[in-house]
């Protein structure tokens, strides 16, 4: 029987009040269903506000489950929380302890908000390497006070949210949201997390976001999804109660209610309508229609494509006819967006029919065909070609064809499979660039370190940065090594040797003055703006600038001069953990 449905408003309020009293008197933890009486609401808000203090997170932790309260009653609490936030009584929201990273809570205190926003805008437009991303993550997610100049606390948090969304790390986002209990403060970040799990068909993972949350959910989109999760977890009465409360405050969503009523088994009638307004709306259509069928097209959102692929709802595409060129174009786009397997696309290319002359003269004949037919012809020719150099040329032609149509990522994994079968020694000079650009290079960190005790920066001395050397011992061994170098006139200190020695000096390791003439330091190698940031103790901005310098390059691929100034900057900032991590990537010989 549908709960509360037949009650008039007066009876509803009486029943709700009795329900609240019974819950409050239970031995279990109380469930906050939001009082109806205005005076009681104001008293509750006053209590909540008084519990917020300077040393706590923005939102007070609670043991109560996440329930969407009545919007008009919740508004006052949100306003009060925002006022607390704006007055900067609550300052720290982050993920990492600054002491664990050689940083401090004031690392952003001297930074200019305009400069920070401009720098993050640049970083968000770049395809950063993992090394650069790690530096930005650390900088933004350290538990530190917000900048004070030209930026509010809320704006600083939004910059963090925008960065986390752009770099899409669901586990990191979830940890950040739950640890700080800020689901309501920045609902867009929570929506992104929920949608990401939904698009990957990880429904339990999406619902778990709410089970770990202690806040009252105020965002309408998130509250609707929470209602669904309650139903999924067999908490139907609670879900219906929350929905009825929402409707009492004016909530109306016909599409959502039809789907929920079906899930609550109040109707057997299937609503076959499909909304693509959000991934949650689309998901509800799938879950409430046993005969659900949907064929995407070029206008279908990427996130819908991703869901269809994750939920294994693209089976009909395997039966597509090769004459349906437009649909094949849609598949190519989906492959490029990583929402459809490359292998399936190239299996489709195999089904095209070409005559002997076309296959024999593929490099000329493909130009006479449509782009899709041309790619199918080149691919079939690649499969038939036995000559390595000719195969490489054809692979380059096919890759360029995808690039010309902005589908570069559609021929990525399959290309690497072909290239891995080719010995790089046999590749002619005019094709080496193509080969090395597209094959997966083994990362140096996956290789073993081989010590070369004839070269300082490749010797066992670098174990110091692993923490395997006592200060007195590293000082003695380094001075002995320098003594040998001074006697050996053929040995010249390299840039990496200098990087090694200067790092020791910054750590206070004693190196004899008689070796000072072995090399000279150029104090101007650090970019002026970074040096100014260091001088002004703008640690956060300096780290972001270093990440910008690294850009899309992995740290061990960067030239020695750039590595020198990065390490020098980190030495001046006293960020040893980051410096040591970089040194152990760039100094050792790896095989």
Image (tube, rainbow, N blue to C red):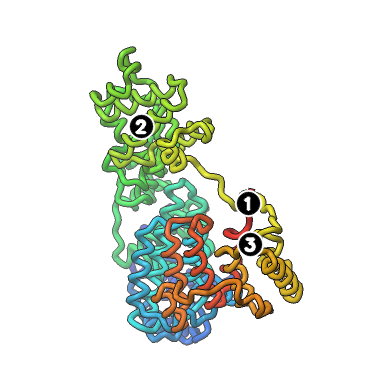
In the drawing, does residue 23 fall left or right of residue 360? right
Examine the rendered structure and indicate whether residue 550 appears above or below residue 85.
Answer: above
Specify whether residue 33 is in view: yes
Q: How far apart are marks 1 and 2 (CA)?
A: 35 Å
Local crowd at mark 1 within 10 Å, few (<14), some, or many (≥20)? some
Which mark's residue is nearer the viewer, 3 or 1? Answer: 3
The secondary structure type at the circle numbered 3 is loop
Q: Which residue is drawn at 46% across and 37% down?
A: 413
Examine the rendered structure and indicate whether residue 494 appears above or below residue 145.
Answer: above
Local crowd at mark 3 within 10 Å, few (<14), some, or many (≥20)? few
Q: In which quarter of the image is residue 428?
A: top left
Local crowd at mark 2 within 10 Å, few (<14), some, or many (≥20)? many
Q: Total marks drawn?
A: 3
Of mark 1 and mark 2, the one earlier in the sequence is 2
Q: Mark 2 points at which residue?
A: 398
Q: Name the residue under label 1.
A: 590
Q: Position of residue 569 (x, y in %)?
A: 50, 73
Comparing 589 with 493, the one in front is 493
The secondary structure type at the circle numbered 2 is helix
The secondary structure type at the circle numbered 1 is strand
Q: Distance between the residues labelled 3 and 2?
A: 49 Å
Residue at the farthest top position: 356
Q: Which residue is drawn at 54% across and 80% down?
A: 104
Q: Where is residue 354 in the image (x, y as percent from the top left)?
A: 32, 16
Q: Distance between the residues labelled 3 and 1?
A: 22 Å
Q: In which quarter of the image is residue 546?
A: bottom left
Q: In which quarter of the image is residue 478?
A: bottom right
Contact check, label 1 and label 2, Cβ < 8 Å: no
């Amino acid at each position: 029987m549908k709960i509360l449905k037949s009650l008039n408003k007066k009876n509803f309020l009486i029943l709700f009040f009795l329900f609240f009293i019974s819950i409050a008197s239970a031995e279990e933890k109380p469930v906050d269903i939001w009082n109806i009486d205005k005076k009681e609401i104001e008293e509750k808000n006053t209590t909540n506000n008084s519990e917020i203090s300077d040393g706590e997170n923005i939102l007070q932790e609670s043991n109560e489950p996440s329930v969407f309260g009545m919007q008009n009653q919740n508004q006052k609490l949100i306003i009060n929380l925002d006022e607390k936030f704006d007055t900067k009584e609550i300052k720290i929201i982050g993920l990492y302890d600054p002491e664990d990273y050689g940083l401090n809570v004031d690392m952003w205190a001297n930074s200019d908000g305009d400069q920070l926003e401009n720098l993050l805008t640049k970083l968000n437009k770049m395809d950063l390497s993992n090394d650069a991303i790690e530096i930005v993550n650390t900088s933004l997610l350290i538990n530190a006070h917000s900048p004070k100049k030209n930026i509010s606390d809320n704006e600083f948090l939004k910059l963090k949210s925008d960065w986390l969304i752009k770099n899409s790390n669901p586990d990191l986002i979830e940890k950040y949201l739950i640890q700080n209990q800020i689901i309501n403060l920045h609902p867009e970040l929570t929506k992104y997390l929920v949608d990401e799990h939904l698009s990957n068909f990880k429904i339990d993972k999406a619902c778990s976001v709410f089970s770990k949350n202690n806040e009252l959910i105020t965002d309408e989109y998130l509250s609707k999804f929470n209602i669904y999760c309650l139903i999924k977890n067999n908490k139907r009465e609670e879900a219906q109660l929350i929905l009825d409360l929402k409707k009492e405050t004016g909530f109306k969503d016909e599409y959502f209610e039809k789907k929920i009523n079906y899930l609550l088994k109040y109707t057997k009638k299937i609503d076959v309508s499909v909304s693509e307004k959000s991934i949650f709306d689309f998901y509800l259509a799938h879950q409430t229609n046993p005969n659900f069928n949907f064929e995407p097209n070029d206008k279908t959102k990427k996130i819908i494509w991703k869901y269809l692929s994750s939920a294994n709802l693209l089976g009909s595409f395997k039966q597509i006819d090769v004459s349906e060129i437009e649909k094949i174009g849609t598949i190519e786009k989906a492959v490029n967006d990583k929402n459809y397997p490359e292998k399936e696309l190239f299996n489709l290319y195999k089904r095209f029919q070409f005559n002997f002359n076309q296959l024999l003269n593929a490099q000329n004949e493909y130009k006479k065909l449509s782009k899709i037919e041309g790619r199918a012809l080149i691919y079939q020719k690649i499969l038939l070609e036995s000559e390595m150099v000719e195969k490489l040329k054809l692979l380059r032609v096919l890759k360029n064809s995808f690039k010309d149509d902005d589908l570069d990522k559609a021929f990525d994994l399959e290309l690497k499979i072909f290239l891995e079968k080719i010995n790089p020694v046999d590749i002619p000079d005019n094709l080496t660039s193509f080969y090395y650009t597209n094959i997966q290079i083994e990362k140096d960190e996956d290789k073993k370190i081989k010590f070369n005790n004839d070269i300082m920066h490749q010797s066992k001395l670098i174990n110091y940065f692993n923490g395997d050397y006592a200060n007195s011992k590293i000082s003695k061994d380094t001075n002995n090594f320098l003594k040998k170098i001074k006697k050996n006139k053929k040995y010249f200190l390299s840039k990496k040797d200098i990087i090694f020695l200067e790092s020791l000096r910054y750590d206070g390791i004693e190196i004899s003055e008689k070796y000072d003439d072995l090399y000279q330091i150029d104090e101007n190698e650090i970019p002026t703006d970074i040096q100014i940031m260091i001088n002004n103790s703008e640690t956060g901005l300096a780290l972001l600038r270093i990440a910008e310098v690294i850009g899309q390059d992995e740290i061990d691929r960067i030239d020695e001069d750039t590595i020198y100034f990065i390490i020098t900057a980190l030495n001046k900032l006293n960020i040893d953990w980051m410096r040591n991590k970089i040194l152990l990537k760039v100094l050792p010989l790896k095989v």
